[in-house]
Amino acid sequence: QVQLVESGGGLVQPGGSLRLSCAASGSIFSIYAMAWYRQAPGKQRELVAGITSGGSTNYADSVKGRFTISGDNAKNTVYLQMNSLKPEDTAVYYCNAGLRVAGAPPMDYWGKGTLVTVSS
């Protein structure tokens, strides 16, 4: 069994900052990449940022320059530092990991999500 547990969401004023964390646990053989997605009410889930095990990153255009993704391979943890938050960043943020457990092919796993609300 693999679990992805997100934390760090909450209510923040426009212009504020939040840091999300996602820890993967279980019988993990290797993690290839981790990412953050978000889904706002009435909208499709979208990629926010991703990071490979080698440290390569990619970002949605809407968050470039404001959000930073980072990872700790030793802890199987990924972080999302979100600065200069805007009301349009309000969404449920989901952690995603592409990984292998022993004896199985690579698969995608998802966390349950953490709510980020940007409002004054």
Image: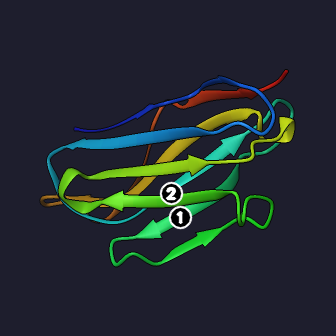
Q: Are the residues at dot 1 and dot 2 in contact (C-beta closer than 8 Å)?
A: yes
Above or below 23: residue 8 = above
Total marks drawn?
Answer: 2
Across and down, in percent, residue 27 comes to 14, 47
Describe residue 91's horizontal placement relative to residue 52 as left or right.
right
Kindly identify which numbered label has been placed on residue 20.
none
Q: Residue at x 59, y 72 (%)?
A: 58
Across and down, in percent, residue 115 comes to 63, 26
Say which element carries label 2. strand
Q: Residue at x 63, y 56 (%)?
A: 67
Amino acid type, mark 1: Gly
The answer to which of marks 1 and 2 sits earlier in the sequence is 2
Quarter holding the C terminus is: top right
Describe residue 33's horizontal placement relative to residue 60 as left or right.
left
Give the colouring mode of the picture. Answer: rainbow
Q: CA distance from mark 1 to mark 2?
A: 4 Å
Above or below 73: residue 16 = above
Describe residue 53's horizontal placement relative to residue 108 as left or right.
left
Question: Which of the 4 quarters of the picture holds residue 39?
Answer: top right
Say which element carries label 1. strand
Quarter holding the N terminus is: top left
Towards the viewer: 7 or 67: 67
Question: Which of the 4 quarters of the picture holds residue 113?
Answer: top right
Q: Residue at x 56, y 28 (%)?
A: 9
Q: Can you identify the residue that label 2 sits on?
A: 35
Q: Can you identify the residue that label 1 sits on?
A: 50
Q: Residue at x 77, y 27 (%)?
A: 13
Amino acid type, mark 2: Ala
Binning the other alpha carbons within 10 Å of mark 1 as few (below 14), some (14 to 19) or many (20 upward) gives many
Across and down, in percent, residue 94 comes to 55, 40
Binning the other alpha carbons within 10 Å of mark 2 as few (below 14), some (14 to 19) or many (20 upward) gives many
Describe residue 93's horizontal placement relative to residue 26 as left or right.
right
